[in-house]
Amino acid sequence: MSDVYAHPSTDAQPAADLLAGYTTLRLGGPAGRLVTAVSAEEIVQKVQQAQLQGEPVLVLAGGSNVVIGDQGFPGTVVLVRSRGLRVLTEDADTVTVRVEAGEPWDDFVAATVANGWSGVECLSGIPGSAGATPIQNVGAYGQEVAETITGVQVYDRTDGSVGQVDAADCGFAYRSSIFKYSDRWVVLSVDFRLARSPLSGPVRYAELARSLGVEVGGRVPLADARSTVLRLRAGKGMVLDADDPDTWSVGSFFTNPVLDREAYELLRERAADLGEPPSWPCPGDMVKVSAAWLIDKAGFAKGHPGPEGTAISSKHTLALTNRAGGTSTAALVGLAREIRDGVHSRFGIPLHPEPVLINCTL
Ligand SMILES: Cc1cc2nc3c(=O)[nH]c(=O)nc-3n(C[C@H](O)[C@H](O)[C@H](O)COP(=O)(O)OP(=O)(O)OC[C@H]3O[C@@H](n4cnc5c(N)ncnc54)[C@H](O)[C@@H]3O)c2cc1C
């Protein structure tokens, strides 16, 4: 199992412990207190303790989808470091697996591929923990976890109970769920139902299908899907690499805007000189448009520099990087603001951040 998280060696950390050491952006001021929880029971215990002491609590796992302000977090930060997975039920066609919240997501995906369990292979290479995947309904290359999650075991901070939120009640939507921006639930583990199959699910993403040499909708051996996704992601700086500052990011900084038909037609008019904006149909006659395209066409190319050594990744227009490694969160947010405002004034479309902003605003 990979050791992908930075680990404090003891529970009580000095107040000056910078959260920058626990985020993939390498940004974030001091934590009031940092504690580590290595099991579901410990997660509950440590969140309860902090609550009893009247302290604000931040649950942090891989730190790959947070932007933490330079002031840090003036309460208890609970680092989720529980590990493990176990089969709950199985039959000839499916297997239901429970994964502890702190299990590194990509270790889990690798295990599913090795075991011949199909359903999350296109989500290879996404950083962070299994427990955070329901938070924003993690997705990539035509798959999202909403398709395979059956239930999420949670600690409910409002009444101190431990229970399950069934998938149907998770409010899964594009990069969203009831858990995102809510302090109510702490995810302890997640159940996934996967197909027993040596083949991937139908490949839905055109670029992936092309790279695999199949038609959209075709299936390929699980290991091929995984290795091709990993290769495509690495080429875009979307697999963490300590030596590649293009990956010192939160992945995509903005979500793809989802527009109603009228707003989409307006965009097409405003972009008439630029060709057809890339788009995908969504339920309810909505249209999802590419944030990367909007950003690029608004004049922010790959590598576009921001203040204090921040920059758009040289490999992907949607990733904002702290490539100098010592920059302030204020500088990164400044770059994000410049891009958001530039896209708005060119196309009239508001961009929204994908990561969770903690003690900072855009
Ligand atoms: C290079 C790169 C590529 C990426 N590519 C993708 C991608 O393709 N698709 C995609 O969807 N995302 C992508 N991401 C974003 C990120 O990896 C995912 O959102 C991931 O699931 C975050 O996991 P984490 O453990 O790092 O969460 P953290 O950053 O630690 O936390 C994120 C949020 O979830 C909350 N949280 C975390 N764990 C728990 C828990 N156990 N209980 C309650 N709340 C919790 C935190 O409080 C915070 O609000 C990428 C990020 C990077 C850096």
Image: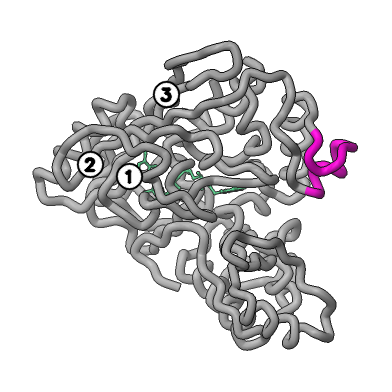
Q: Is mark 2 within 8 Å of ligand 1?
A: no
Q: Residue at image x 30%, y 27%?
A: 40
Snapshot quadrant of residue 197: top right
Who comes first in sequence, dot 1 or dot 2?
1
Quarter of the image for the C terminus: give it: bottom left
Q: At which x and y percent is residue 317?
A: 70, 64
- To which residue does mark 1 refer? 59
Who comes first in sequence, dot 2 or dot 3?
3
Looking at the image, is mark 2 or mark 3 nearer the viewer?
2
**Is residue 213 highlighted in magenta?**
yes
Looking at the image, is mark 1 or mark 2 nearer the viewer?
2
The kind of residue tagged 2 is Asp
Q: Is residue 276 visible?
A: yes
Q: Is residue 21 visible?
A: no
Snapshot quadrant of residue 287: bottom right
Tag of residue 38:
none
**Which secondary structure, mark 1?**
strand
Q: Do residues under tags 1 and 2 come within 8 Å of each other at their CB atoms?
A: no
